[in-house]
Image (tube, rainbow, N blue to C red):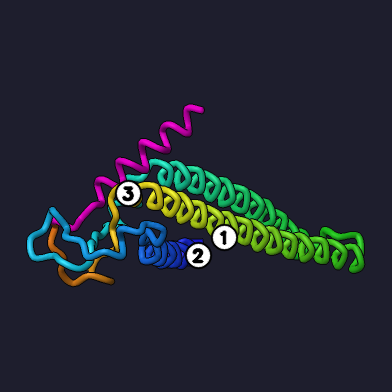
Amino acid sequence: MKKTSIVLKGCLVLAIGLTFAQCSDKGNKEANKPTVNSGVQGSTNMKIAYVEIDSLLTKYNFWNDLNELMIQKEENIRTTLNERAKALDVDAKEFQRKLENNGFASRERAEQEQMRLYKKQQELQALQQKLSDELAAENQKNSLQLRDSINSFLKVYNKDKGYDLIISNSGFDNLLYANPAYNITNEIIDGLNARYTTSAKK
């Protein structure tokens, strides 16, 4: 279960990175003109900014709410599987005890009980796979929702800002160094949270 979460989280960061890389406002005619980033001296041709993905994921309320729901679902799945596994273990121990003490009326009856336990074990494994697949699918759906949410916000946000390029940064994956004046993370987080709060009230 943890391996799945780690892989999905890695895919999520990659997907968000692609979102930011594609978010230049192509429809803005002013983007074709050479611009100067008023916040940074020496910047002439392109207006560039970056967003720290780790901070965004930590502070974006929509993503935090989705995460809480997923954690609860994962906990419910774990509880269900543990309860089924314990019940199977009890049955298996009882079968072994009866077998050792000649507690079955016939060999056929013992074999029937053994087959019942085997079937129960297979059903538990199938349930575990089913629930794991459902959780992974929901995680993927949530990742797409997050990407779409950020992407749609950036399109609106960039109409006024006119950035040619907004880059995502996760640790040192993409940027080894960037002038902090180009960092628009808090502005993006505030805008996303304001929009999410408004939509939640509707």
Q: Nearer the viewer, residue 167 or 80?
A: 167
Would residue 111 appear left or right of 124 to someone viewing this image? right
Identify the secondary structure beneath mark 2: helix
Identify the secondary structure beneath mark 3: helix
Disc tally is 3
Looking at the rendered structure, the kind of residue marked 1 is: Ala
Please tell me which of labels 1 and 2 falls first in the chain.
2
Looking at the rendered structure, the kind of residue marked 3 is: Thr
- Image: 66 above or below 139: above
- Magenta region includes residue 201: yes
Residue 120, position as x, y percentages in the image? 76, 60
* Residue that carries the numbered disc 3 in the rendered image: 58
Please tell me which of labels 3 and 2 falls first in the chain.
2
Residue 166 at least partly seen: no
The segment highlighted magenta reads: 181-202
Residue 143, position as x, y percentages in the image? 49, 56
* Residue that carries the numbered disc 1 in the rendered image: 136
Please tell me the numbered disc located at residue 156.
none
Q: Are marks 1 and 2 in contact (CB under 8 Å)?
A: yes
Residue at image point 11% right, 58% down: 40
| Real-space CA distance between mark 3 and mark 2, rounded to the nearest whole angstrom | 20 Å
Classify mark 3: residues with Cα within 10 Å, few (<14), some (14-19) or many (20+).
Answer: few
Q: What secondary structure predominates along the stretch shown in magenta? A: helix
* Residue that carries the numbered disc 2 in the rendered image: 4
Q: Are marks 3 and 1 in contact (CB under 8 Å)?
A: no
Residue at image point 63% right, 57% down: 134
Q: Nearer the viewer, residue 124 or 168?
A: 168
